[in-house]
Amino acid sequence: AQSVTQPDIHITVSEGASLELRCNYSYGATPYLFWYVQSPGQGLQLLLKYFSGDTLVQGIKGFEAEFKRSQSSFNLRKPSVHWSDAAEYFCAVGAKAGTALIFGKGTTLSVSS
Amino acid sequence: GAVVSQHPSRVICKSGTSVKIECRSLDFQATTMFWYRQFPKQSLMLMATSNEGSKATYEQGVEKDKFLINHASLTLSTLTVTSAHPEDSSFYICSARGNRGQINTEAFFGQGTRLTVV
């Protein structure tokens, strides 16, 4: 079955600390992988995406993610978290570019001062 | 990136009434639109996929007679929640995909509609 797992429901990090949000997927074909961020009551903003090529992907707001096929993972990282990064983060997978996505349950990020 | 506008952002309606939500692609032609539903503190679940000029394809468990989707033009899709009940209260989000260039490589999301049925 196709699925996306985000093992961490809620993470709290100190401002300025590094961040890693985990994402594992189960997909029968070559996955197209995405990370989105959602602020309360808002829509989704694309942080980054991976289709092919370099497995380390750079996104907006200083985020990056690494695709590891052997581990079926696409973890999101940021070297130094800012208070404005507090939000809900969703990992998603699709069959190909522009198709419907399967989302993980999300990870809530809180940033402490 | 391409812009998708969703309207209204919030709506409160009485139980038994119908509500229409619009999803517009502002600067590209959306050949395909997707409608998702998000319950509080949960993930987004695909409700249906619509291609311009065709009937929508609904996911298993989604009542097509209750959630009417129309995609009559390349820039507009609508979701009508008919005879809404409190259990239909949710956050509804659309996304749209074009057919060339960057807009063919990802689906762009609207800002969502918070529906509250009282």
Image (cartoon, rainbow, N blue to C red):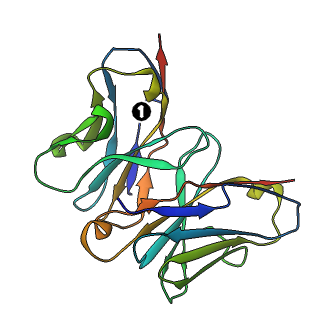
Residue B80: percent from the left, percent from the top?
70, 73
What is the secondary structure assignment of the residue under circle 1? loop
Nearer to us in this view, A10 or A72 = A10
Q: Residue at x 41, y 33 (%)?
A: A7
- Above or below, comparing residue A5 to residue A52 in the picture: above
User: From the viewer's perspective, is B101 left or right of B79?
Assistant: left
Residue at mark 1: A7
Residue B78: percent from the left, percent from the top?
62, 74
Mark 1: few, some, or many residues within 10 Å (few <14, many ≥20)? some
Residue B66: percent from the left, percent from the top?
73, 73
Quarter of the image holding residue A58? Answer: top left
User: From the viewer's perspective, is A83 left or right of A77?
Assistant: right
- Above or below, comparing residue B75 to residue B42 in the picture: below
The residue at the far top in this view is: A113
Please state the chain letter of the residue tagged with numbered disc 1 in the rendered image.
A
Label 1 amino acid?
Pro
Query: Does residue A104 appear in this view?
Result: yes
- Above or below, comparing residue B53 to residue B110 in the picture: below
Nearer to us in this view, B101 or B42 = B101
Quarter of the image holding residue B20? Answer: bottom right
Q: Residue at x 22, y 60 (%)?
A: A30
The number of numbered badges drawn on the structure is: 1
User: From the viewer's perspective, is A49 left or right of A6?
Assistant: left
The residue at the far bottom in this view is: B53
- Above or below, comparing residue B85 to residue B40 in the picture: below
The residue at the far left in this view is: A54
User: From the viewer's perspective, is A48 left or right of B71?
Assistant: left
Query: Does residue B60 appear in this view?
Result: no
Of the 4 image quadrants, the one containing the N terminus of chain B is bottom left
